[in-house]
Amino acid sequence: MTKHGLVIDQERCIGCQACAVSCKQENNVPMGQFWNRVLTEGGEKMDTPSGGYPEDGGSGSLDMQYQPTACQHCENAPCVKVCPVNATYTRDDGIVEIDYDKCIGCRYCMAACPYNARVFNWDEPEHMPEEGTGDVEARPQGVVEKCTFCSHRVDEGLDPACVVNCPADARIFGDLDDESSTVSKYIDKYETDQLLEDRGTDPNTYYISGEMSPGRPQTSDKMESELDDVSPWSDGDDDVPSKEADSAGGESSGSSHSVEGGEIPYATPAKSGGDD
Amino acid sequence: MAANTGSSRVAIPSFSGKGKLWIGLLVALMAAGIAAWGYQLTTGLIATGMRNVFSWGLYIMMFVLFVGLSAGGLIISSAPKFFHSHRYEGFARLGVLVSLACIIVAGLLILPDIGRPGRIYQFFTSPDFRSPMVWDFGIVLLYGLLNLWYLWLLTRRDLAARGSALALGFKDTEAGRERDRTLMFWTAAVALPTAVALHSVTGWIFATQVGRGDWFSPLVAPVFIAKALVSGLGLLLVVSVLADRYTNFEVDREELTSLGKILGIFLAFHVVYLLAAERLPHAWADHFEFWAIMSNFLIGDSVYFWLWTVVGGAVPLAMLALPTLRKRVSVIFTASVLAVVGTMFEGIRLVFTGYEVANIDSAPGISLGGEYTGITTDIWATAGSYTPTLVEIAVTLGIIAFGAFIVTLGLKYVPIQRVDAEPSYATDGGKQDQ
């Protein structure tokens, strides 16, 4: 079985909003709505830290981190269980998706979601440009919509738009049921949290904090599993990527951040606890 | 058995000038409600005060209230029948009529809340039985039909005696009345657990949700039962006092006083005991000093809390507890009105406690999904806020007016009381004596 999951490395995230914007474009998300939001863990406002400046008399305790937040694709998804008409359902690959033909717009799922990941089309959705953007059909007025892990891309063997467009390689998508996948290895190796773990929803989205991971290992917009033998860990003996690790295959897509001499770019693991 | 004709009466033989004015008012409210709903259908739910963080509003708050209100009448008329008692016989038919109207109002209130009402058939074609809403949909439907059946069963022999077409061909015979008494017992036996299920399932819509603060509490279902008893009995008393005043319906003073006392007991159990039981453990666990625990236990946090517990709890409770006051009809009436109003604020508070705080409230927050008006508009919110719009209020009032219209028609066309002094219904072979 496949169980798609997302790992977000908060140590790598630079708060650039590229994932939020590419999600909006890719999925034709209406004006005034966001499926994917980059929240600031820190001060009162966006992009503001908590604590005091390191100046005379100040506490020098400035602290800030970004938390990109969208549908967490929970294993025990309350939204799926409350939907009276089976419009929200869990796919066999773990993606929580909505059948917009069935949705009656009762918004019980919005009450159920502890993450406020769902938005409702209160009026006729507006798009700019008017014909819409991206590859997903616009949803009508009166239905609830949300992140689908770009299931239309996943079905084609592509990573979600937010993942391939993350310039910090902070988002890693993969199969949580596959022990050799990068997401499984990172969850195993790094300190990860699920949001609101105490609610028992068991999200398939994990957040790395503390030590920075090497980030998303491939440059293609394809999913790791769709790439031919590119995993530096395909031999299965080392779960931490290192500079020495090298493997053949996989075409470099000419991505701007490819590393010379190898198809698999890694960031050097930063010193742990970097900016805290 | 034409001899029975004189033994039942309708409350409104014909509409007087005032009666016509009342009907006119209700029709005007219903027309305004339909117009407002039409407007909302064309513009979308943007016409309401609801947005992405606060995504259920007045319709659901009033749904909760009217489900509760539908309890009183049915329980007051079926509980004595179940125990073969003649108590409160005079309230039995009016009670079921009021219950029927309230459950219809509750059911109708869901329609304008639905984003795409045209798809509501999905409840039948694609139900998910994990969803409490599917069960609630079923039980509201069942409860409505049960009330309709019960009202007809209680009155069909009298309707037949009066030659009304509403008897649907049934004849008024002694054997028929005898059989109906048995049917009434069995209907009461079904009605009581159905009422309990209705209020519990409605409570579980909220109580099952891990993401909405205080909703996730095992106490919600019992609290819904208690508030149904309080508000349902309260409304029955209000309606019967009004009917006594403005129609030929006659209230038995002694039974009214007795029901007033019962309302006091319900209030004490609900607003004092259950509320205390709900608050104490949290207050105790969250605080350290004795007075910190006490003040957190006793002092509420929102205006809705005070409107509910003081205006809708302590005041009517005091009125019904003082022996010098509680026999007066005006006192019983006022206390009942306050109990209903208090329960309304309890439902409002419940919805607010679920939505006003977002679990993850980091900036910029959650996109509200309101009308997009330009680049400078702040589309974000880190907490929920809600004020109903005029459209919501008009739709809600229109539906409530429809409920009042049903009660008025019932008072006009259904023999709402037996005139004979002797109680006429018993399942233990009690004979009628006229």
Image (spheres, coloured by chain):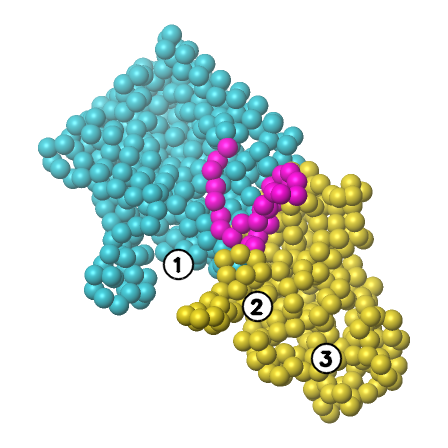
Chain colours: A yellow, B cyan
Contact check, label 2 and label 1, Cβ < 8 Å: no
Residue B190 x/y as whole percent = 41, 44
For the record, the magenta segment spans B364-389
Q: Residue furthest bottom?
A: A237
Alpha carbon of mark 2 to alpha carbon of mark 1: how far? 36 Å
Q: Residue at x 49, y 71 (%)?
A: A54
Of residues B378 and B232, the one drawn nearer to the viewer in this rendering: B378
Query: Could you tell me which residue is drawn at 25 percent across and 29 percent down?
Result: B333
Q: Which mark is residue A65?
A: 2
Task: Judge from the rendering whether residue B331 lies leftward or rightward of residue A118; answer left or right.
Answer: left
Q: Residue furthest left?
A: B324
Q: Kindly indicate the quadrant of the structure image that contains residue B434.
A: top left
Which of disc 3 and disc 2 is earlier in sequence? 2
Q: How far is disc 2 from disc 3 in space, using C-alphas? A: 19 Å
Mark pair 1, 3: CA separation: 50 Å
Q: Are marks 2 and 3 in contact (CB under 8 Å)?
A: no
Of the residues shown, which amino acid type is indicated by label 3? Ala
- Do badges 2 and 1 share one subunit? no
* Residue at the spot of label 3: A267
**Counting other residues with Cα less than 10 Å from the Cα at mark 1, is it few (<14), some (14-19), or many (20 or more)?**
few
